[in-house]
Amino acid sequence: MTARRSRIGLILTGGTIDSLGLSRLDLGWYIEAGLKLPAADLLARVPELDAIADVEQVPFRRLPSHALASSDWLDLLRLLETLLEQDGYDAVVVTHGTNTLEETAYFLHLALKTNKPVVLTGAMRPASAVSADGYLNLINAVRVAAEPASHGRGCLVVMNDTIFDARHVTKASTYRVEAFDGRDVGPLGFADADGRVVYYHRADRTERAGGEFALAGLEVLPRVDVVVSYVGADGAMIRAAAAAGARGIVSAGTGAGRPTPAEDDAFDEIHRDSGVLMCLCSRVGSGRSVRSPGLARRGFVAGDNLQPWKARVLLSLALTKTAEPDAVQRLFDTF
């Protein structure tokens, strides 16, 4: 009996993968040109996908990834839920600009309530470039989405033949095609040159967290800002974030997550006066920020090994349900 072909939705959200430069060597300034492939052209340029699965493009707005807002995330989430839960798709591939791809992937990983694969991919070179990488990235993302072993692994990112989990993946280079890295845990596996998808390990914390949050009817997520520590930093940015309506602030602290004394004073002040929740992370490239007894007494949470911008995603989602520090810390310890 012939195996049933996977039915995979393809959502284009924009980014380098469907951008066009002014020449085949325009690898750096193509964003300024503002040129895009017509909506159906990316799929038409990769006929090899027909041999892998039944791929159907699904309309969505196309924006540079650094232009996305939480309202776009919520719309994308609801579209994915419809495709996977009601419309019968086996998996979905989302093309995305690489600048904030890791944040979108982590948001979807946390918020989706499905074990079906959702795979994000993009490109480091525009579609018009010599050695454009987006076409093969798309092929490999569809291969990963169609692979039975991809079920139950949370949201995945496929770039440069490499499969990453959404929690740990990060963009670590500005222009190189090997831009993405798995930080503390490395890649999960590879979409290899022989066409096989091979996994070598499974990252923890891949459980779906969607039931932990209250997203029904939301148009935007609670505001959470990130404040970076450096020599001489005072509390001005922290107080400004609170004045702008932030319900949470992530501190990208020095070392293992230390703000300056002036920042500490501002954190205590706005937590006491406004109930703004603080999450301490590190500006360092890897390793954990831990919740000391003193932080727990002050009502702060610690971001574990999440980068500050990913801790912002989890804190914003957590605040849809609770602002109680111990309950929020449980989410950071779990997801």
Image (cartoon, helix red, strand yellow):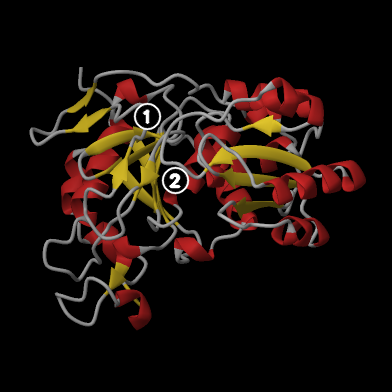
| Vertical relation: 238 (above or below) 154 | below
For label 1, the SS is loop
Where in the figure is residue 26, as x and y percent of width and height?
20, 76
Circle 2 residue: 102
The residue sitting at the right extreme is 273
Q: Nearer the viewer, mark 2 or mark 1?
A: 1
Give the residue drawn at x 37%, y 29%.
184
Q: Is residue 34 visible?
A: no
Where is residue 209 shown, x and y percent of the image?
A: 61, 27
> Label 1 neighbourhood size at 10 Å, few (<14), some (14-19), many (20+)?
few
Which residue in the protein does label 1 denote?
184
Residue 155, picture quadrant = top left
**Image position of 109 with respect to 244: above or below:** above
From the viewer's side, name the closer residue of 30 and 232: 232
Looking at the rendered structure, the kind of residue marked 1 is Asp
Q: Which badge, 2 or 1, is on the more N-terminal residue?
A: 2
**Residue closest to the eye, 169 or 58:** 169
Amino acid carrying label 2: it is: Glu
Residue displayed at 69% across by 31% down: 301
